[in-house]
Image (cartoon, helix red, strand yellow):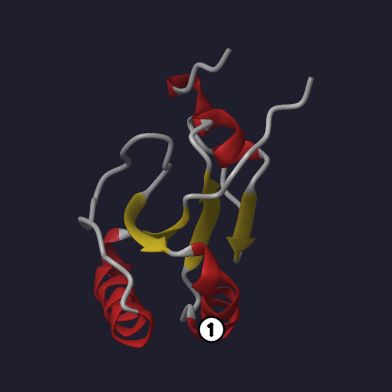
Amino acid sequence: MARMLGIRDFHAHIYFDADQLDRAQSLARAARERFGVPVGHFHTDPVGPHPRGSCQLTVRPEQFGEFAQWMALNRDGLTIFAHASTGYDLSDHTEHVIWFGESEPLHLDIFAEG
C-alpha cells in the first residue's frame, strides 16, 4: 500500500565551491530578504548527502512556487538542490527533488528506510 505523504517544508541547498562562497552567501541573503527563509550554516566541505559545500534554506510549502520561480532566474550560475521534506529522507533526496542547474550525485548511503 502506498504511504500518504505530506510536505512539511522544502529544503533548498545552495551548492558552492570555495571560490563561490561569496556568491552563495549573497544569494542566501537575497532569498532571506525576499522570502524570510531561514538560512543555515555555510558548510565549506561536503556534509551529509551533499557532494560539495552547501547551505540550506528552509522554504514553507505555500511559498515554494514563487521561491522556485525566483531561484530559477536569480541563482547566479550556482547549483541549487531542492527537495520536499516529508520525513522519508531517502525518497526526499531521490524522488521529491528539483535541480536548478546541473544535477550532482548525492551520497545516499547515509539513508536507511524501511
Q: Can residue 69 be seen in this view?
A: yes
Within the image, what quadrant is residue 98 found in? bottom right
Q: In this view, does 51 lie above or below 64?
A: above
What's the residue at 55%, 39% (across, down)? 93
Taking the image as drawn, is residue 16 in sight? Answer: no
Q: Residue at position x 48%, y 34% from top?
A: 87
Is the N terminus in the top left, top right, bottom left or bottom right quadrant?
top right
Comparing 12 with 77, the one in front is 12
- Residue displayed at 36% across by 62% down: 57
- The three-letter code of the residue at mark 1 reads Trp
Q: Is residue 38 above or below residue 13?
A: below
Residue tagged by mark 1? 70
The front one of 25 and 84 is: 84
Q: Which of 28 and 58 is in front in this view?
A: 58
Task: Report the number of discs.
Answer: 1
Residue 86 at x, y percent in the picture: 53, 41
| Residue 8 locus on image (x, y percent) | 47, 50
The quarter of the picture where residue 18 lies is bottom left
The residue located at (55%, 49%) in the rendering is: 7
x, y percentage for residue 6? Answer: 59, 45
Residue farthest toward the right in the current orientation of the protein: 1
Q: Where is residue 46 in the image (x, y as percent from the top left)?
A: 32, 41
